[in-house]
Image: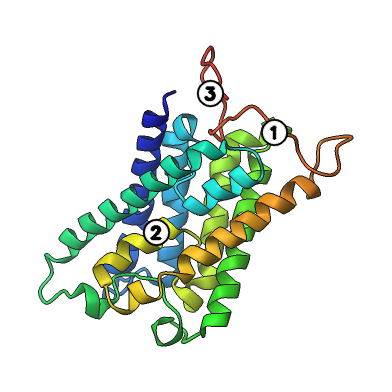
Amino acid sequence: MSLTRRAFAELLGTFWLVLGGCGAAVLTAKVPGLGVGFLGVALAFGLTVLTGAYALGSISGAHFNPAVTVGLSVARRFPSREVLPYVLAQVLGGIVAAFVLYLIASGAPAFDARASGFAANGFGEHSPGNYGVAAALLCEVVMTFMFVMVILGVTDGRTPSLKPFAPIAIGMTLTLIHLISIPVTNTSVNPARSMGPALFAGGWALGQLWLFWLAPLLGAAIAGVLYPRVYPLVGEPERRPEVEAEPAAFPREPGRPAPAQ
């Protein structure tokens, strides 16, 4: 499968994640008497990853998140030369989704993306629970760390029986992460998810965006370093060897050659 096709699958999957998750937050979370609240938003993010992974995982690996791509690369489960194309595709998908969501939301009278916050991530006075920068940073690092650890575990080639259920485990993990951390930061664990809404919320959201790049990437990198040491190959306790690059979290179609190294 060409890198262009895989990158497009990442764009499409990230588009779906941001449109579904942030759409639930912007359009339905606060509808009087019918709003889905925190639980509904958490489920929306989890369900977008679950459905997107089943639909697109066999093409691109269903990262849909720059932090996941970086974590897999650090763990030597994804070729480093393809990190940048994947990240660019994911960020573009998040921006396009935010634009579509903005167009939909603008159909309501008096909608104001800046005044509403537009599901942007934040800390301090822009945190749903008024959590400070240190708490927000720690929360995003830890949540992303655990997210990537779960992804590495359920897509490990030594546990093939888990792969058909990987999207379920990953989607449920993302749901749990949102249930924990929405009050702290509105939950990012994904720089592409943060980037799109911030561009439309502007002002403070752009000013605080640095944290929602730094913390997820740091948490993912830590997971990428630690996972091979927690679960090393037999006889190789130090680190997993460089493996033949397989960007997908799911098996390739029969007869499809592995990407060239």
Q: Quadrant of the C terminus?
A: top right
Q: Quadrant of residue 27?
A: bottom left
Residue pushed farthest right?
235
Circle 1: is it few (<14), some (14-19), or many (20+) Cα within 10 Å?
few
In percent of width and height, residue 54 lies at 47, 37
x 61%, y 52%: residue: 148
Give percent across and percent down for residue 145: 63, 59
Residue 259 is tagged as: 3
Q: Position of residue 75 (x, y in %)?
A: 66, 44
Mark 1 residue type: Glu
Q: Earlier in the sequence, mark 1 or mark 3?
A: 1
Locate residue 255 relative to residue 118 in the image: left or right.
Answer: right
Residue hosting label 2: 193
Q: Earlier in the sequence, mark 2 or mark 1?
A: 2
Q: Amino acid at mark 2?
A: Arg
Residue at horizontal 29%, vertical 55%? 95
Tell me which numbered mark, 3 or 2, is placed earlier along the sequence: 2
Helix, strand, or loop for circle 3?
Answer: loop
Q: Residues within 10 Å of mark 3 (few under 14, many from 20)?
A: few
Q: Is residue 49 left or right of residue 70?
A: left
Q: Is residue 184 above or below residue 39?
A: below
